[in-house]
Amino acid sequence: MSKVATLEFEGKKYDFPVYIGAEDEIAFDISKLRDMTGMITLDFGYKNTGATKSAITFLDGEEGILRHRGYAIEDLAKKASYLEVAYLIIFGELPTKEQIEKFDSDIKKNSLVDEEMKNIINGFPRSAHPMGVLSALTAALTAFHPNLTDVHSEEEMYNAICKIMGKFPVLAAWAHNKNEGTPRTYADNTLDYVENLLMMMYKVPTQKYIPNPTVKKAMEELLILHQDHEQNCSTSTVRLVGSSHASLFASVSAGVSALWGPLHGGANQEVIEMLEAIKADGGDVEKFILKAKDKNDPFRLMGFGHRVYKNFDPRALIIKSSADAVLKQLGKDDPTLDIARHLEETALKDPYFIERKLFPNVDFYSGIIYRALGIPVEMFTVMFAIGRLPGWIAQWREMRMNNEPIGRPRQLYIGQPSRSFVDMDKR
């Protein structure tokens, strides 16, 4: 810190320290603002508020840049496995061969879920949304592992991380099994992390499961692309809950609930629902393109543009080829996916979308891939949660290891001023 920012109000000046980030971002520290001035800042949705310093993810929405621990998302998605990227995000460096083998082995040792968890999932109706089931089951892990993690013990932290990494995809698969009315499945330690997830979701008890390399590659890329995305709603929730020293399981459960909201994790589900609506209307893509261009029409194209990426979504550029490969290999005869391809081709060539940089984003392509794989729309956000898990863990770990204070936002009170109590007979 070598610079200061000066605030002037009613003839008085106040200086605040200025910090420069690793990528030259600038932030001035207002943590003493209320003590110095009696004032607070007002920032709805915290859109311009930095609540922490983090060494995990760098995101530049204007330039379409996403890096984890300094590594470009393009390199990580193409050259690393899901577990390698998870290790990097959580522990700070790419793992050696010995480290990743141990991480993989330790996760597999922790993949067994207590049989009593079945009593909990059996209490849900089959109609229960799998995200609600997943959140509840993740929170229930605190009952089976009640001891809080000693964040000053590397061994305890590592064991807690392996526990949730091992059990979370099993719980997600069980939520899917519950929805589908199929038997609960268990992990197979002869398979890798992503193959295990696909097996638990798709294995039929009477048949041997054989992984499809194209499907596995697309799924692995998708999960990598969703691992962390800076201080979004669910990640901020995990850090806020964890700041009270709540357990990793309880904090991740809160993150699942935050991700469940349609404004956050439900975007790829909205893509499919939009495509279904276009199909139900007759499948006239040009008609809906015109509706999207009409500023007086409430219709919006889901899966195009991004609230953070103002130029292009780098994750979409990566996953597009995998989406094409999945559709080509599976040869799906699906009118909804045909509409998606037509929409994509039209939007990529239309000057209206090009000028406004309304390109297909990662949610558009992930929705297409999940649809092609036969994953129900209710499970889309669950798949997102599995991808995001390492990011939640990393952010929780960073926050606890830095001994950050409990989160406690302020507010601007706009209710009634002080007034006298009115007795019942006078109201």
Image (cartoon, grey):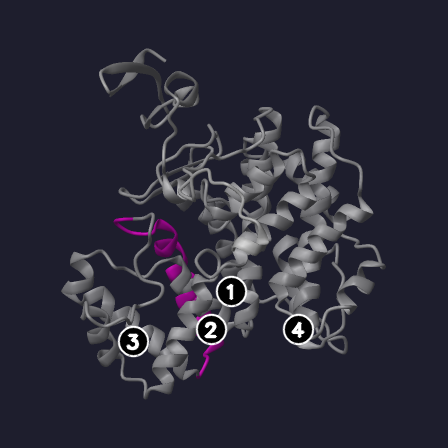
> Helix or strand or loop: what does disc 1 sit on?
helix
- The stretch in magenta equals 310-333
Badge 4 density bin: few <14, some 14–19, many ≥20, Cα 10 Å? many
Mark 4 or 3, which is nearer the eye? 4
Badge 1 density bin: few <14, some 14–19, many ≥20, Cα 10 Å? some
Q: Which residue position holds label 1?
A: 214
Residue at 80% from the left image edge and 43% from the top image edge: 145
Q: Which residue position holds label 2?
A: 329
Give whichever of 130, 177 is nearer the camera: 130
In the displayed image of the protein, which residue is found farthest to the right? 116
- In this rendering, position of residue 71 left or right of residue 124: left
* N-terminal label among 1 and 3: 1
Where is residue 157? Give x, y as percent: 70, 32
Give whichever of 409, 412 is nearer the camera: 412
CB under 8 Å between discs 3 and 2: no
> Helix or strand or loop: what does disc 4 sit on?
helix
Alpha-carbon span between mark 2 and mark 1: 8 Å
- The answer to whether residue 278 is above or below residue 172 is below
- The answer, for residue 37, to whether it is visible in the render is yes
Alpha-carbon span between mark 4 and mark 3: 31 Å
In the displayed image of the protein, which residue is found farthest to the front? 425
Q: Which residue position holds label 3?
A: 342
Please tell me the numbered disc located at residue 179: 4
Where is residue 102? Give x, y as percent: 71, 38
Q: Looking at the image, how many numbered discs can be counted on the residues?
A: 4
User: Please, what is the three-letter code of the amino acid marked with disc 2?
Assistant: Gln
